[in-house]
Image (cartoon, rainbow, N blue to C red):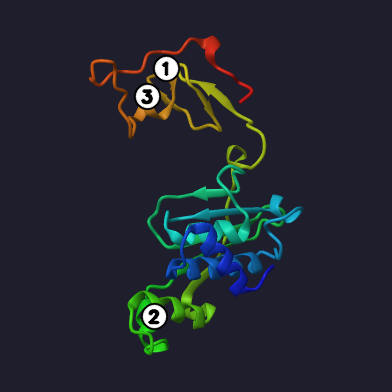
Amino acid sequence: MKDFETLLKGSGEAHGHLCPGQVVGVKMAMEGCRLIGLDEPSILPQIKKLLVYVEMDRCAADAISYVTGAKLGRRSLKFVDNGIMAATFVNLESGRAFRIVSREEARELALVLAPEIPDKRGRQMEAYKRMSIEELFDIEEVRVDVPACDMPGPTRFKAVCARCGQMVRDKREIMKNNEILCRPCGLGSYFQPINEQGKENVPRRRAQGSQNPAL
């Protein structure tokens, strides 16, 4: 694995800017990979051994993805919307996993470790660089039972929504009133379809032949 400063520079460029969250994420990813025994996680063969769960959609998540090579599109990066600055690193081959949580006390410690830097953002960033792993994080070994539907690789499970006809992959369908439904139909959605008159419209069932099960 590359050294911290090189990874931080690359992470900042990939993310769009350097910030305290980038420092936390790079250090978190480096330590997580070390704990599960991976030193080159972003390339073969190790890339197939790694699964990462991130519990926040903040800057640190991009840093973790950059360092580890884990990506949503590869199904090696999982987003668990807990709103916690934490990530869990899983070695799929050995089964070992560690959850790393950023310590809130580190924010206060930043005032002590880098008092010479006047602005808060710069002070936090420099202090996080100087902090030890023990000062920055709480770490615990955990067990993660990864179901087959969450594993990287080709789609193993498919179902068709009885209401709209949409193909649902990876067992994300739900059962409601003895019907197989996609989550938008069964639970509601973040979007509302609009018809030509500008009114909310219920999506019509797609023709079954329009599905492409190969995708």
Please identify, in this view, whether the residue under mark 2 or under mark 1 is nearer the observer. 2
Q: Nearer the viewer, residue 13 or 54?
A: 13
User: Image point 62% across, 42% down: which residue?
Assistant: 151
Say few, some or many: other residues with alpha carbon within 10 Å of mark 2 (under 14 / 14 to 19 / 20 or more): many
Callout 2: helix, strand or loop? helix
In this image, 173 relative to 66: left or right? left
Please name which of the two marks, 3 or 2, marks the residue nearer to the observer. Answer: 2
Q: Amino acid at mark 3?
A: Cys
Question: Callout 1, which amino acid?
Answer: Cys
Image quarter in which the N terminus is found:
bottom right
Compared across the picture, whether 134 is left or right of 195 comes to: right
**Residue for badge 3:** 185
The kind of residue on which mark 2 rests is: Arg
**Label 3, residues with CA under 10 Å away: few <14, some 14-19, many ≥20:** some
| Image: 38 above or below 208 | below
Residue 136 against residue 208 in the figure, above or below: below
The numbered mark, 2 or 1, whose residue comes first in the sequence reads: 2
Residue 3 position, x and y percent, is 65, 73
User: Which residue is the site of mark 1?
Assistant: 164
Q: Which residue is found at the position 41% from the left and 86% from the top? A: 114
Mark 1 and mark 3: span between their CA atoms? 7 Å
Across and down, in percent, residue 126 comes to 45, 80
Residue at left offset 63%, top offset 32%? 155
Relative image position of residue 72 (x, y in whole percent): 55, 45
Q: Which residue corresponds to the image point at 42% horizontal and 87% vertical from the top-left?
A: 113
Q: Which residue is mark 2?
A: 123
| Disc ID at residue 88 | none
Pointers 2 and 1 in contact (C-beta within 8 Å): no
As drawn, which residue projects farthest toward the right? 45
Q: Helix or strand or loop: what does disc 1 sit on?
A: loop
Q: Can residue 64 be seen by looking at this rendering?
A: yes
